Image (tube, rainbow, N blue to C red):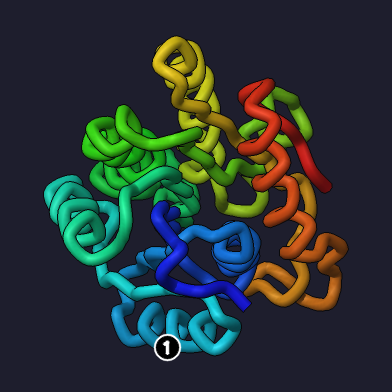
Amino acid sequence: MLVHATMTKTIVVCGYGPGISRAVAERFGREGFSVALVARNGDKVKAAAAELSKQGLRAQGFACDLSDVTAVRELLAAVRGELPQITVLHWNAYSHAAGDVLSADLEELNGIFNLSVVNLIAAVRECLPDFQKAERPGVLVTGGALSNYHPQADERAAQWGAMGLSIAKAAQRKTVGVLHAKLKPLGVYVGEVTVSAIVKGTAADRGNGTLEASAVGQRFWELYSERGESTVALG
């Protein structure tokens, strides 16, 4: 069991849920990271933090609307005041808004783009002072197969009412790439795991899930540890 007093680094898990982000929190927690769990529902993340604490991990829940850039900045300041130095940012936030870009309110499209790109960048910028002092800092992003530049991915996005998500995730992948190139000389690793299968036990799993969340958590840990390529696919 981990001893809380030894934990001198924090991973901030933005967009917490019972699947991928839970697995990432557990995997990094076992490696000595304190864990900040972030979601809009404060009761949910507090309950999740209590569950992780029972495993011997140091975890704390923070309520935040990650679509609000001001709230994102305030969140990271709050984490900084409550937990050890921010060393890793995990951006797992997403939205199904603007499913049909030809009929959705354009503000929905702005919102999902901001969530996936603009506010991710804002979070990275807010964390830079911490990263510059941290050992092996990193930014880890959850991607999806609908971001692929392939006709089949485009057809599915249109058919499934996930056009906004597809566009936002594609832009997010480019964001990861340019941040990887920009921050690598500063010693900050930026990488993305593109999840190409349905994760078991999540809202998307209707009995057809094929990928264990723990496998995704492990792949994120490997990506962070190896600090090589910026994007890998899983599933």
**Is the residue 139 above or below the residue 175 in the image?**
below
Q: Secondary structure at mark 1?
A: helix
Crowding at dot 1, Cα within 10 Å, few <14 / some 14-19 / many 20+, comes out as: few
Q: At 16% across and 53% down in the image, what residue appears?
A: 77
Is residue 152 left or right of 194 when viewed as pictured?
Answer: right
Query: Residue 149: x and y, percent?
Result: 68, 23
Q: Is residue 179 left or right of residue 1?
A: left
Residue 118 visible: no
The part of the image, by quadrant, that contains residue 84 is bottom left
Name the residue that disc number 1 marks: 47
Note whether 34 is above or below 223 in the view shown. below
Is residue 229 placed above or below 25 in the rendered structure?
A: above
Residue 33 can be seen, yes or no: yes
State the residue in front, 209 or 60.
60
Residue 156 in picture, x, y percent from top left: 71, 44
Q: Nearer the viewer, residue 51 or 9?
A: 9
Residue 83: image location, x then y, percent: 29, 63
Quadrant position of residue 192: top right
Quadrant in the picture for residue 118: top left
| Residue found 87% across the figure and 63% down from its top | 210
Does residue 22 appear left or right of residue 139 in this picture?
right
Does residue 150 sit above or below 157 in this rendering? Answer: above
Q: Which amino acid type corresponds to the residue marked 1 in the rendered image?
A: Ala
